[in-house]
């Protein structure tokens, strides 16, 4: 007897998605996120309709980005602080911005197994990042996933970044608060992370401040505090603090979260939070315009036909990049001076 074929899942209407997300139906929440992450043109219209209907139910969550040097223990920290927040009656969503490996195409960050305790907590939702696509595409999907999670009632969204390159800038521009995780005992702390990343920070936390490492962590905190005096703060109303924490022992987490809440109160009192989110939405719009224009240009038949020859000319030094770019744009129908 031939094995029976699995019954295909019923296709959900937009009403089904909206009702399921608003009632925090985990199965439908996962399918809604898969819909908005999809690169398929046939899913785009429904995904955008869904997001428009969920927008009025989003925006009230506290959005926190978390980055850090390699080995700083981001996963352990996020699991510790996420579980602690859940125990404080919060509902926590964890999203990851992971620009896929250009070599293998696979995910750098891995999956939920890194945060097993948090991923199985009834008040938490852990979603790995898409495993392919440009950093800008991953950023769009993370922003839209954030809207879905907020509409489902998650009042804290933690956005993890891999900790290298442009992803930190992307994450800092989609959150209210950006936390940089550091460690002591790994050489010169200021060499362990780019100065530009520290300048994005609203708070710097020295992790693994426990056991024999406690004194080193405290010295690292003092050094980072000194360095912070020479950096331009993100907001004129907030001086980024430097704290010691231990994700392993759970120490310092309440103090850290108190600073996160204090930062939100300061920004709200000056009207900075609303203005920050408005500017983030505007920059997001233009980023999407640029990404889609570039995709359209690359797909244009005349551009595709002329591109190999222009690239060869640039590589061989027969044509300047500026003139080659002008020729490409003219093939696309754009006249440049």
Image (cartoon, rainbow, N blue to C red):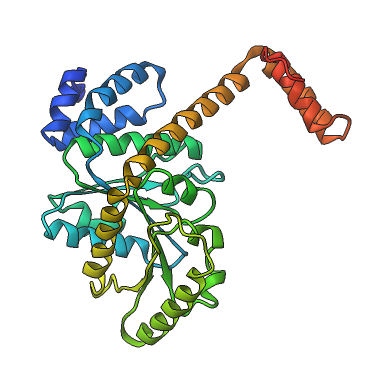
Q: Nearer the viewer, residue 284 or 135?
A: 284
- x 78%, y 32%: residue: 321
| Total numbered badges shown on the rendered structure | 0
Quadrant showing the N terminus = top left
Q: What x and y, as percent, mark residue 16?
A: 15, 22
The answer to whether 213 is drawn above or below residue 12 in the figure is below
Classify 309 as above or below 201: above
Q: Nearer the viewer, residue 136 or 179?
A: 179
Task: Find residue 146 and report its horizontal and vertical position in percent.
Answer: 30, 39
Look at the picture and state if 335 lies above or below 261.
above
Residue 250, picture quadrant = bottom left
**Rendering coords of residue 203 (x, y %):** 38, 63
- Relative to the observer, which residue lies in front, 28 or 197? 197
Q: Quadrant of residue 174?
A: top left
Left or right for 184, reference 76: right
- In this rendering, position of residue 210 left or right of residue 87: right
Q: Position of residue 81 (x, y in %)?
A: 24, 62
**Residue drawn at x 49%, y 36% as measured from the top left:** 136
Judged left or right of residue 164, residue 80 is left
Q: Observer-nearest residue: 168 or 238?
A: 238
Name the residue: 49% across, 48% down: 169
Residue at 55% in and 62% down: 195
């Amino acid at each position: 007897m031939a094995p029976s074929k699995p019954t295909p899942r019923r296709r959900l209407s937009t009403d089904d998605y909206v009702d399921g997300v608003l009632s925090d139906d985990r199965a439908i929440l996962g399918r809604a996120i898969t819909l908005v992450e999809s690169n398929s043109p046939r899913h785009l219209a429904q995904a955008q309709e869904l997001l428009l209907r969920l927008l009025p139910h989003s925006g009230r969550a506290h959005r926190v980005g978390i980055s850090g040097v390699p080995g700083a223990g981001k996963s352990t920290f996020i699991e510790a602080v996420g579980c602690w927040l859940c125990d404080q009656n919060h509902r926590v969503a964890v999203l990851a911005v992971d620009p896929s490996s250009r070599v293998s195409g696979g995910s750098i960050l891995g999956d939920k197994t890194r945060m097993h305790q948090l991923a199985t907590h009834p008040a938490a939702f852990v979603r790995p990042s898409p495993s392919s696509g440009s950093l800008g595409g991953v950023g769009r999907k993370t922003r839209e996933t954030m809207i879905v999670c907020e509409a489902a009632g998650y009042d804290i969204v933690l956005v993890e970044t891999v900790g290298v390159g442009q992803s930190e800038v992307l994450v800092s521009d989609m959150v209210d608060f950006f936390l940089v995780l550091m460690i002591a005992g790994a050489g010169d702390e200021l060499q362990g992370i780019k100065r530009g990343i520290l300048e994005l920070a609203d708070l710097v936390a020295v992790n693994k401040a426990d056991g024999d490492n406690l004194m080193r962590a405290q010295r690292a905190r003092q050094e980072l505090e000194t360095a912070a005096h020479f950096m331009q703060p993100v907001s004129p109303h907030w001086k980024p603090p430097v704290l010691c924490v231990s994700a392993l022992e759970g120490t310092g987490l309440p103090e850290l979260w108190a600073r996160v809440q204090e930062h939100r109160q300061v920004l709200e009192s000056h009207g900075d939070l609303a203005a920050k989110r408005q500017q983030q939405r505007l920059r997001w719009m233009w980023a999407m315009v640029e990404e889609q224009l570039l995709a359209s240009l690359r797909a244009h038949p005349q551009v595709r036909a002329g591109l190999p020859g222009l690239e060869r000319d640039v590589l061989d030094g027969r044509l300047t990049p500026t003139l080659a770019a002008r020729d490409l744009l003219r093939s696309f129908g754009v006249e440049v001076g």
